Each structure stands twice: as C-alpha cells, then as structure tokens.
Image: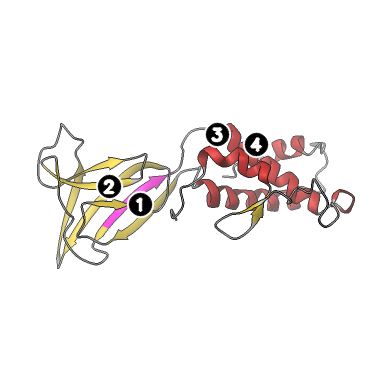
Amino acid sequence: MPIVDLASVKLHLNIPTTDTRQDLELQRFMAAADDHVRDVCGPITAELHTEWHDGGRSTIALDWLPLASVQTVVEYVAASSWILTEQPLGSSTDSYGYTVDAERGSITRRAVGVAVPFPAGTRNVRVVYTSGTGGAVPATVFLGALELIRHLWQLTQQAARPAFGATGSYDADGATVPTGFALPARVLELWKPFKRPPGVA
C-alpha cells in the first residue's frame, strides 16, 4: 500500500482530480517515494522479515527498524532446535527465553531472567519479526513524501526545471541517502524524526 494516495498527490500539485492524463506518471513517482521513505526512515507499513544471526553473544540486533513485534526466535545446535519464548524481566519462567528492546531493535537471550549467550554458531539463530510503525503514516513522513513527489514532478516539467547551479534549486541543499541518491533538504528535514540510525539495513 503506497505511503500517499493519488488524490492527496493531485491536491498537493494542484492537479484537478478529474484530470487523469498524468496518473500513470504520478503513480510511478509515488512508488519511488515509497522506496525512498523505506531507505531513509525504514518500513512504515508492516513488513514481515526472517533473518539468520550468528550465535555466541547474548544480544542480536535486527536489521529493520522500527520493530513492531517478534513472532518467533529459534536457536539451532547441530541437528537440534529450541523455540524460545518472550519472557519479560520479572516474569521469566525457564531457561529458554528472550527479551525484546523495541526501541533499539534488539533481542537478548535470557535464562530465568539472566542474560546468557545464544549457542555459538554461524547463522544458527532464526528470528521472524514484523517491522513498521503501524497505524497511520506519521504526518511529517506523509508530507515529506508529497514534497519528494512534487520535486520529481517539477523535474519533468520544462518550465519548472531550474537552471543548473541556480540558487534555490531544489537539489542545492540536498543530501545523499543510503541508496546514493540526493534528496531535497526539505524532504530530509521532514523525515529527520524518523530517520534510521547509521548502519541499519
């Protein structure tokens, strides 16, 4: 599901809703905006991930934030496997538990509440989890997506295309994001509260 809807895009660009001549192009811009939102802010809509992590340490960091929920954590030793259960501190019941730090996107192995290492191994801990903010798209993320679509739209309109190097160009104050593209500073400013920390997938 797109971050923004076509009706909102047309309203933002002052295009009459009855004018459908540009709909296909606008939908391509909407898809591009979705990719950039995910690149800069992480998943907004819910996404299910399955990851394999190395054991031998007590805490593993998940690749995609924000972390919404953890479905399963399984550790493997040779031909054996153990399904762990989430056991918040203060309610631990056995030696096969884990706790979740949703803010940091990490999982800590627990045995009766005490942090212990996952069994040593390479890619022997499997985690299935859901990432995404859940609920409504944050207002600044929504507006930033609309501004990015406006930027892409203006680049296709010869009359709106600024001269190379001109002051006030949309790209003049842009910054490079993880995928290597330069985005307008205004867009990055709007997305800043939800920007993923460096090094996160």
Kindly identify the amino acid type of the residue bearing the numbered disc 1. Answer: Leu
The colour scheme used here is secondary structure
In the image, which disc is placed on residue 18?
none
**Res 4 seen here:** no
Ranked by sequence position, the earlier of labels 4 and 1 is 1
Mark 4 and mark 2 in contact (Cβ < 8 Å)?
no
Image height of 64 relative to 121, above or below: above
Mark 2 and mark 1 in contact (Cβ < 8 Å)?
yes
Give the quadrant of residue 191. top right
Q: Which residues are magenta?
A: 126-131
User: Would residue 130 appear left or right of 18 to someone viewing this image?
Assistant: left
Q: Identify the residue position indicated by label 4 in the image.
A: 143
Decide whether the magenta segment is chiefly helix, strand or loop: strand
Ranked by sequence position, the earlier of labels 2 and 4 is 2
Residue sitting at the far right: 159
Ranked by sequence position, the earlier of labels 1 and 3 is 1
Where disc 2 sits, the SS reads strand
Q: Is residue 129 magenta?
A: yes
User: Would residue 183 appear left or right of 39 to someone viewing this image?
Assistant: right
Q: Residue at position x 54%, y 52% from top?
A: 39
Kindly identify the amino acid type of the residue bearing the numbered disc 2. Answer: Ile
Ranked by sequence position, the earlier of labels 1 and 2 is 1
Q: Identify the residue position indicated by label 2 in the image.
A: 107
Q: Identify the residue position indicated by label 1 in the image.
A: 62
Pinpoint residue 184: horizontal percent, then vertical percent. Answer: 69, 48
Ranked by sequence position, the earlier of labels 3 and 4 is 3
Q: Identify the residue position indicated by label 3 in the image.
A: 138
Q: Residues within 10 Å of mark 3 (few under 14, many from 20)?
A: some
Kindly identify the amino acid type of the residue bearing the numbered disc 4. Answer: Leu
